[in-house]
């Protein structure tokens, strides 16, 4: 009887885990679809998307142009929350994790933020989309436009930092707060890029979506490796990338 109850408990646990992982895969797919769709529409120069981008860029630019102080504020924040900032933060978090003995998550973090940057450059070179050209520009940026490197780095970096922090958080409220706080700077830096006239709206949406997809992809690969090594299955978006490494150290 005890064995039967134990087997039933494990089956229920496996079923709940399977449902949660299915939900996670579905959520990742929702982020993949916008990026792929935008990529196709940009490549074929879909006129309605171009019109939407033009309307948003023109409207936001006019608003920022009318307030030089606001333009300077956005310029400062877009630099503060730039790609290099996220890279430094992730590398610093990885160094801390390495020092604490969590070496595998440290490597995962560095690989993820590096892969995000490389992928962004490759896609920009393939798409070759020009940046907005607006009258009386308030800012300037080099290179191609799609997808936004600032938005992608922010989405990737913020997600990586949360996934490394989650093992130390307790309760759904604190975890939800961490994800919400991570989303705020990512969305804000995306807004600054459009408002300053250096990116189209579709560029930053694609950047945010692809940043999440890259993080989710490396996290899924990491979790699969853990299971193949016989480690306890984890729910990364709830527990972090390797909960046991941060709770007891990983000094193998």
Image (tube, grey):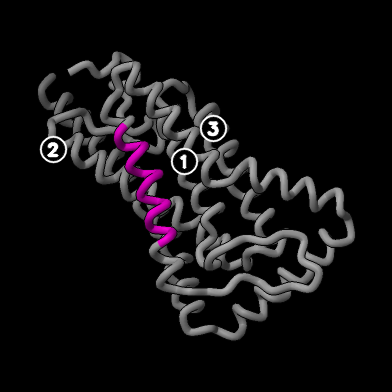
Quadrant of residue 131 within the rendered picture: bottom right
Q: Look at the numbered disc 2 and give the secondary structure of its residue.
A: helix
The answer to which of marks 3 and 2 sits earlier in the sequence is 3
Q: Look at the numbered disc 3 and give the secondary structure of its residue.
A: helix
Residue located 43% across and 59% down the image: 120
Q: Which residue is mark 1?
A: 159
Q: Residues within 10 Å of mark 2 (few under 14, many from 20)?
A: few
Q: Residues within 10 Å of mark 1 (few under 14, many from 20)?
A: many
Q: Is residue 78 above or below residue 199?
A: above
Q: Which mark is residue 178?
A: 3
Q: Position of residue 192 (x, y in %)?
A: 69, 53
Q: Which mark is residue 228?
A: 2
Query: Alpha carbon of mark 3 to alpha carbon of mark 1: how far?
Result: 10 Å
Q: Do the CB atoms of the residues marked 3 and 1 lie less than 8 Å apart?
A: no
Q: Position of residue 155 (x, y in %)?
A: 51, 47
Residue located 71% across and 69% down the image: 57
Quadrant of residue 183 within the rendered picture: top right
Query: Alpha carbon of mark 3 to alpha carbon of mark 2: how far?
Result: 29 Å
**Residue nearer the viewer, 163 or 232:** 163
Q: Is residue 49 above or below residue 148?
A: below
Q: Look at the numbered disc 1 and give the secondary structure of its residue.
A: helix
Q: Position of residue 92 (x, y in %)?
A: 45, 28
* Residue range corresponding to the magenta coloring: 107-121
């Amino acid at each position: 009887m005890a064995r039967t109850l134990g087997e039933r408990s494990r089956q229920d646990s496996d079923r709940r885990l399977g449902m949660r992982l299915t939900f996670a895969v579905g959520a990742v797919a929702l982020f993949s679809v916008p990026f792929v769709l935008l990529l196709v529409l940009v490549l074929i120069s879909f006129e309605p998307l171009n019109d939407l981008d033009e309307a948003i860029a023109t409207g936001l630019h006019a608003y920022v142009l009318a307030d030089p102080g606001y333009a300077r504020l956005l310029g400062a924040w877009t630099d503060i929350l730039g790609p290099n900032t996220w890279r430094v933060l992730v590398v610093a978090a990885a160094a801390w994790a390495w020092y604490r003995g969590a070496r595998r998550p440290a490597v995962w973090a560095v690989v993820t933020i590096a892969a995000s940057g490389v992928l962004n450059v490759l896609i920009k070179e393939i798409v070759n989309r020009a940046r907005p050209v607006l009258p009386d520009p308030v800012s300037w940026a080099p290179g191609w436009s799609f997808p936004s490197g600032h938005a992608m780095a922010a989405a990737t970096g913020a997600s990586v930092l949360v996934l490394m922090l989650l093992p130390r958080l307790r309760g759904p409220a604190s975890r939800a707060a961490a994800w919400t706080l991570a989303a705020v700077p990512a969305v804000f830096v995306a807004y600054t890029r459009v408002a300053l006239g250096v990116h189209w709206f579709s560029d930053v949406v694609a950047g945010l979506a692809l940043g999440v997809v890259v993080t989710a992809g490396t996290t899924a690969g990491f979790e699969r490796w853990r299971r193949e090594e016989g480690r306890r299955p984890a729910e990364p978006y709830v527990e972090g990338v390797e909960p046991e490494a941060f709770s007891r150290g990983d000094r193998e």
